[in-house]
Image (tube, rainbow, N blue to C red):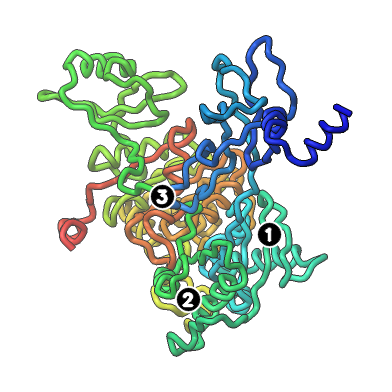
Amino acid sequence: MAKKKLKADEGNGSPELKKKNTAKARPAKVIKPFETTRPGKKGISHKPSDVLPISLSDVKPVYEAGAAEKNGQETFHRSEFIQIEELPAKRSSTDHSPEQKPAAKKSPVKTTKVKRDSKKKKIFVLDTSVILYNHDSINNFEDNDVAIPITVLEELDNFKKGNDTKNFEAREFIRIIDSLSDNATLTDWIPLVKSKGGMFKVVMNERSELDARQIFDDNKPDHRILNAALSLVQEYPDRKVILVSKDINLRLKAKSLNLTAEDFLTGKIKDVEGLYTGISTINNLSSRIIDKLYQNGYCLPRDIGVKSPVPNHYYILRNTNTSALACYNALTRRIERLEKRSAFRITPRNAEQVFAMHAILNPDVKLVTLQGVAGTGKTLLALAAALEQKRNFKQVFLARPIVPLSNKDIGFLPGDIKSKINPYMEPLYDNLKFIQSQYSEKDKEYKNITDSLENEKLVIQPLAYIRGRSISNVCFIIDEAQNLTPHEVKTIITRAGQGTKIIFTGDIYQIDTPYLDAQSNGLSYLIDKVKHHSIYAHVRLEKGERSELANLANDLL
């Protein structure tokens, strides 16, 4: 009867029994996000169910949010990984749940890396100017996607014929697109073979909420390209769309439409003012060191305070009484004194010209760059030094890119091909005539130059005519190299065979090619990338020697 009464009392909810039942009951477990197991104390066993919640404030990002994007490099705008610290959860002092355990001794903080979803890839929309600058540009955007408006393909169709650089770039790009479309439709995303996971597609003339043709009241190709970029912004609102163009005005129009736009940065140097000069001046040098140079013909780098000498770097060493010109020879590891040398009666007039002549005549140097303003003697020195050693080469090539000062191609000029090209080659012939004028017509050197032209031992041609040729055992001078793209410069150098010497001359501040500037031209790119190489020498010529009038123009105008 006692047992039955007890059960009846339980059913009626006896206060005494309610109190006992409450003490024995386990609270319901609540599962919260970011839970972690509390570290246990030695000698105390924890069940897998002993899980404690952790607040979002305990989650700490490994990488901070990205800074502003610079130079086209990727920037993390969200953390790639998050770091979770396993800390004991805080409990109320009044909580006497059976789950409670005595405070455990603090153990080292453990971290767990959790991979987040990969960042959204950007979409780069390329303008025609980028393709004509570098036909392989679509493979220069890492793992991001690249889109080409159909208008760009239409414009490239106008450039595919001809021997100029832009014609070559257009044809090569069209071949690349043709190979990509072998097994796919160009309006769908196609994998780029050379990139790190990037995709490619052609954007048709899609319409967007903003219509650049109506805003700028013109249906020109630039505005259709803007519309293609705007349509991608509308189609992919969660991805960043960037218009890439060498055309500054097009970039400004894009920004006025709140569209991100930037220059094509591949091949562009950052600090043109800090570009390598190839020359150092050391003042207040001990007379003993300079005397040693004159007596022995050399000294050691440490004698002049140079710890890490650059191969073929030139030095002007001076004190109050005397001076000397020297060059570091990487083969002998010595600073060697230089003497003034002439070539075909062309004698250097200043230290810079002495260095330039030495670099071209040095058989151990296979690549030379001469950079300087008009009238510094770049082309004249290069041609005279090349003629001086022409017996060492099968041919001497003198070439320059044809860059019309007007917007018309040379095909529009009257006359045959020779009469069209000659105006662009005249500056080279002028230098050759000046060298010949140092001799009388009876001198063998005079006749030697004439015979070399007739026998094609000395060849003066537009640079486009030499494309595709293998250049072996040749002294090759490229004048006005600042009008070349980095890709063109690379193509020329990779054509060089055994026994070839290449000399680039130019002024990086006198550029005639559209979409090139002092930072992005091929000459600046070459000087910046090849410095410190043992077969390379560079000289910046700053002092004009053409005439006082020419110097006045360079200095004041």
On screen, residue 150 versus residue 321, left or right, reads right
Residue at 33% over, 40% down: 277
Q: What amino acid does circle 1 point to? A: Met
N-terminal of the two: label 2 or label 3?
A: 2
Kindly identify which residue carries mark 2. Answer: 419
Marks 3 and 1, how far apart at CA: 31 Å
N-terminal of the two: label 1 or label 2?
A: 1
**x, y percentage for residue 6?**
82, 31
Kindly identify which residue carries mark 3. Answer: 524
**x, y percentage for residue 394?**
57, 45
Q: Mark 2 and mark 1 in contact (Cβ < 8 Å)?
A: no
On screen, residue 94 versus residue 382, left or right, reads right
Residue 452 visible within the image: no
CA neighbours of label 3 inside 10 A, class few (<14), some (14 to 19), many (20+): many
Q: Quadrant of residue 528?
A: top left
Q: Which mark is residue 455?
A: none
Seen from the viewer's position, the closer of residues 198 and 404 is: 198
Q: Quadrant of residue 125?
A: bottom right
Secondary structure type for disc 1:
strand
Kindly identify which residue carries mark 1. Answer: 199
From the viewer's perspective, is the residue at label 2 or at label 3 nearer?
3
Q: Locate the N terminus by quadrant.
A: top right
Q: What amino acid does circle 3 point to? A: Ser
Seen from the viewer's position, the closer of residues 103 and 376 is: 103
**Hey, which residue is sitting farthest front in the picture?**
1
